[in-house]
Image (cartoon, rainbow, N blue to C red):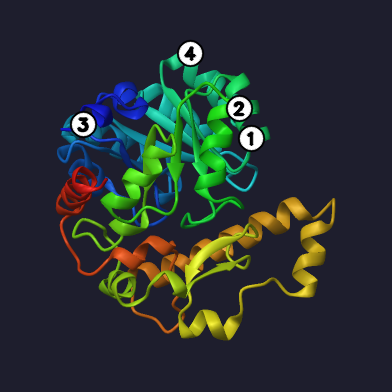
Amino acid sequence: MNQDVKESGLCKMLGIDFPIIVAPMFLVSNKEMIIAATEAGVTGAIPALNYRTVDELRKVIRELKVEAKGPFGINLIVNKSNFLYKEQLIACCEEKVDYIITSLGSPEETIKQARQAGVKVFCDVVDARFAKKVEDLGADAIIAVNKEAGGHAGPMSFKELIPLLNETCSIPVISAGGVGNGSEAKEMMNYGAAGLSMGSVFIASNEAGVSDEYKQACIDYGKDDIVMTTKLSGTPCTVIKTPYVEKVGTKQNRFERLLNKNKRLKKWFKAFTFMKGMKRLKNAAFSSTYKTVWCAGPSIEHVHEIRPLKDIVNSIREEYEQAK
């Protein structure tokens, strides 16, 4: 093992062998993927929203505490569109997950409660201003979401974002987006990343519980087939440009945009848009339907077959060691 990698911020912080978080992916991430990730010497996280109830979330955390071979995390949507947020946060703290990843909102309350419970908090950020803010709140690390990320991407390239955040903040910078193989992982780490959050390359894993059609799409399509849409959650989100996505378009219509700006209605419209979009994703993820809306990032360019998650991690590690 390359000593530099073993000494990286993420490895030291979590006691893992290689600095990868198998990123939390809505509908895709599951218990089996996390177990496989920990067996491969990395870590992984699951979105709390993958479980319909907080009791289901508690159950899987307790099972992972027994079955996982290493640390794991839970991703929380911390804005008002997530009506279960407060209960999910309590569950994560009481069950003492290793870390929480916060997305799409202020992590202040999460950091406050997690610190009391001895749980680490990593915060998604897209710019230096918010990164400094979450550091001041007490975050343990920041996840730098760049414009190559799958799902909710940021506006900056990793070449701009990682050095900027390292200059602005003193806590570890974990990079999210634009990594599909070991060579790209090495490049990202050379830019100053303390670790990597990788998601899309693991959709086509044996352990992912999504449909074979979704997995095959990650093989058949590439980086040039990824487009940004605001129709799913109201926030720009990357999806594969299937014929259905081309048909319905990627931008909200005029009426939707007006509702999104209305001071009194926007909270409820955002929540409605989010719930409707998540239902559409769920229908496509687990069954064959012509209404195919599959979330993924440009790193599917490197997906060529369906493999065990452990094999994907091992390939990345081998390529990393061989890269200059």
Q: Write the residue at 61% across / 53% down.
A: 155
Cα distance between the residues tagged 4 and 2: 26 Å
Camera-nearest label, 4 or 3? 3
Q: Are marks 4 and 2 in contact (CB under 8 Å)?
A: no
The residue singled out by tag 1 in the image is 128
The residue singled out by tag 4 in the image is 116
Q: Are marks 2 and 1 in contact (CB under 8 Å)?
A: yes
Instruction: Classify 10 Å Cα crowding around label 1: few (below 14), some (14-19), many (20 and above).
Output: some
Q: What residue type is labelled 2?
A: Thr
Instruction: Report x, y in % for residue 247.
Output: 56, 86
Q: Quadrant of residue 289?
A: bottom left
Q: What residue type is labelled 4?
A: Gln
Which quarter shows the C terminus?
top left
Q: Compare marks 2 and 3 and give the one earlier in the sequence.
A: 3
Classify mark 3: helix, strand or loop: loop
Instruction: Classify 10 Å Cα crowding around label 4: few (below 14), some (14-19), many (20 and above).
Output: few
What mark, if any, has residue 17 been given in the picture? 3
Q: What residue type is labelled 1?
A: Ala
Q: Is residue 32 left or right of residue 111?
A: left
Q: Compare marks 4 and 2 and give the one earlier in the sequence.
A: 4
Q: Compare marks 1 and 3 and give the one earlier in the sequence.
A: 3
The answer, for residue 84, to whether it is visible in the render is no
Classify mark 1: helix, strand or loop: helix
Cα distance between the residues tagged 4 and 3: 27 Å
Q: Do the residues labelled 4 and 3 touch (CB within 8 Å)?
A: no
The answer, for residue 277, to whether it is visible in the render is yes
Cα distance between the residues tagged 2 and 3: 27 Å
Classify mark 4: helix, strand or loop: helix
The residue singled out by tag 2 in the image is 168
